[in-house]
Amino acid sequence: MPGQCRGQCRCRPQPGWATAILETLDPSPAVASVALRFDLRDLELFVAVADAGSIARAAERSHTVASAVSKRISDLEDNLGGALLLRGAKGVELTAAGHALLARARVLLHQAAQLDDEMRRHASGTRGYVRMFANISAIVEFLPHALASFARQHPDIHVHLEEHVSSAIATAVADNSADLGIVSELPVIDGLSTVPFRNDDLVVVLKPDHPLAGRSSLSFAELTDQPFVGLHAGSSLHRLLTRAAMESDRSMNWRVQVTSFDAACAMVAAGLGVSIVPRAAAAVYIRSLSLASVPLTDAWAQRQLFLCVRTGAPLHSAAKSLYDHLQSQK
């Protein structure tokens, strides 16, 4: 994985990769034709420094001496023809060129790790490899059964699944960091094709003795004065509820924010508030924690999940097999 090669990774960037980075810094033809000399370890250390905000801290985390890290970064700056870092007594800051390189470097390191993993799997006899990103709703509700049946039918295809929020999934599919993705809202970026995947209805989860637990349905407007247990601020569900509150000229009373549906249900069971979660994802927790669930009447609570792929870029055979399988599971 990126940040863990420690100089042992056999992968090396192809000339086109270096050119892509350079064009980010200066897209002129003259600059783009310059031959660069650096390897993935240089990019690893640069990302480590950017993340740590300090050469010394990055060196410690990378099990390398600070002078060696500093020399690598200086050589990288010489090769690229400009400063990447502003060095100060309290640490470092990225220059504009440093920010541009950081974005590309993360993609390259991720792709290098995927390449290494894929080649190792080919060497061990696995003949197919699919990179798939999905949001938490799809992973909890629909993918376990679908991927299990796919594995039985295609034992020679490995599916690498990662959980991300919908916006990150769309970006990953568009820039080829993932072969396909499942999102809970239509992407706002170009270059993606989407098809409906599954319905993802939302319900209110409450303690059985809550005054609203006996209702056959509830509107969101009836809940905004309740203490809320929600997912983290980066999640699509958090954004959906925040937007719904703003559109109704109300504000959310967030008491607790967590990172998973099981944690949200556990907080509700402890009496910390109510929560809104996908029906299927919450079903097992509702049973195990003896909670009540009530359907939401708002139109936005009947969510649609979408399967997305890159427009104009045919899927390779393993990814196409998974795409067709997911479509057939409806």
Image (cartoon, rainbow, N blue to C red):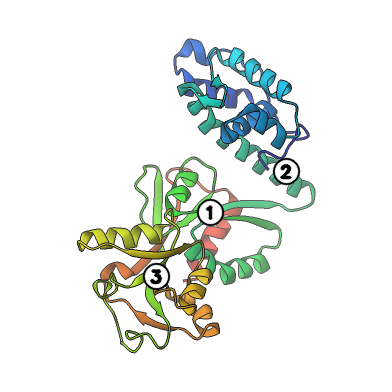
Residue hosting label 3:
199
Q: Which mark is residue 119?
A: 2
Residue in view at x 53 percent, y 68 percent: 140
At label 3, the amino acid type is Asn
Of labels 2 and 1, earlier in sequence is: 2
Q: Which mark is residue 245?
A: none
Q: Is residue 199 left or right of residue 109?
A: left
Indicate whether 42 appears above or below 220: above
Label 2 to label 3: alpha-carbon separation: 36 Å
Dot 3 surroundings within 10 Å: few (below 14), some, or many (20 or more)? some
Q: Position of residue 241 (x, y in %)?
A: 33, 63
Of labels 3 and 1, earlier in sequence is: 1
Depth check: give the residue in front, 248 or 201: 248
Depth check: give the residue in front, 5 or 227: 227
* Quarter assignment of residue 74: top right
Residue hosting label 1:
133
At label 2, the amino acid type is Met
Q: Position of residue 5 (x, y in %)?
A: 73, 37
